[in-house]
Image (tube, rainbow, N blue to C red):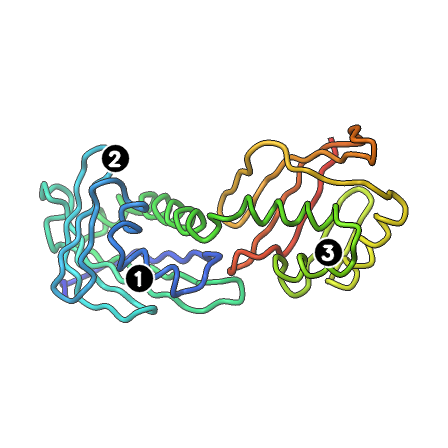
Amino acid sequence: MIASTVRLDRTILIHARPAIVFEFFTNAEDWASWWGAGSRIDARPGGQLLIRHPNGVEVIGEVIDVRAPERIVFTYGYASGSSIPPSGSQVTIRLDNHPAGTLLQLTHEFTDAEARDQHVQGWRFQLSLFANAVANKVNASAAETVDRWFAAWSDPQATSREVTLATITSGEPAFYDRFSSIAGSEDLKAHLAAVHKFMPGMRLERRGDVRHCQSRVLADWVALGVDGQERGRGTNLFVLDADSRIAEVTGFWA
């Protein structure tokens, strides 16, 4: 325990379950995917941690407390001794359940205000990187999910189409584009039935790689007629829930 006089508090919402988020504090590979190559952590009381920033600056510390998947506490100081000496500050990270995933609450305790002020932007940046590192892991199969969405739209058989939707969407998905304002699974099912009634043989296909950031995924697509000719193209924005299922889609026609 340090003789802290000031603290920095920051909260961020991460679209993943606490158990998954906590792996980034206990698994050295996940820890390094957040901080940078060469970073490591021994997640037990008394275990050592190393943060190696891409610019070569190193932070060292010791794990004080671990309560998976709720809390980790560790000391934090620079190997060079500059700004904050080894064991010169303390970080507490708490994870709470949230309807959208995990609410991460960070407290960094310092012995002086100048050191705290030097880390305000640093933690804003690093926790943003952290949320993306978690999203990269949780949504590693985002391209497959997107392709199954397009496959469902292209499937003329209601039974198999609805089975696909049930496995890739959250309970009450929403869909919006210039022709649609759909809320809920029953409305979506009826909408797709109408698509195949009025545009028989139509199919959607993804074009190019998906791009994802946090819980948002962008995917370009083309709409093809029964003759294989292009009838339209555009981009979909998918919003994924904490279990990497589709909660909302907005389609932008080119």
Q: Quadrant of residue 93?
A: bottom left
Q: CA distance from mark 1 to mark 3?
A: 43 Å
Residue 190 location (% of width, % of height): 82, 58
Q: Return the x and y of residue 52 as percentages of the image width and height.
A: 20, 41
**Residue 84 numbered mark, or none:** none
* 3 vs 2, front mark: 3
Residue shown at 27% from the left, 46% from the top: 32
Q: Amino acid at mark 1?
A: Ile
The amino acid sitting under disc 3 is Arg
**To which residue does mark 1 refer?**
93
Q: Give the mark nearer the N terminus: 3 vs 2.
A: 2
Q: Write the residue at 17% across / 42% down.
A: 58
Mark 1 and mark 2: span between their CA atoms? Answer: 23 Å
Mark 1 or mark 2: name the one nearer the start of the chain: 2
Judged from the image, the secondary structure of the residue bearing numbered disc 1 is: strand
Left or right, residue 219 beside residue 140: right
Residue bearing the label numbered 3: 161
Foreground of the two, 157 or 249: 157
The x and y percentages for residue 72 are 26, 64
Read off the residue under disc 2. Answer: 54
Q: Secondary structure at mark 2?
A: loop
Left or right: 76 as drawn, with respect to 163 = left
Callout in the foreground (1, 2): 2
Question: Residue at 73% of width from left, 32% of height from top?
Answer: 233
Q: Are marks 1 and 3 in contact (CB under 8 Å)?
A: no
Residue 15 vertical position relative to residue 79 in the rendered view, above or below: below
Crowding at mark 3 (Cα within 10 Å: few <14, some 14-19, many 20+):
many
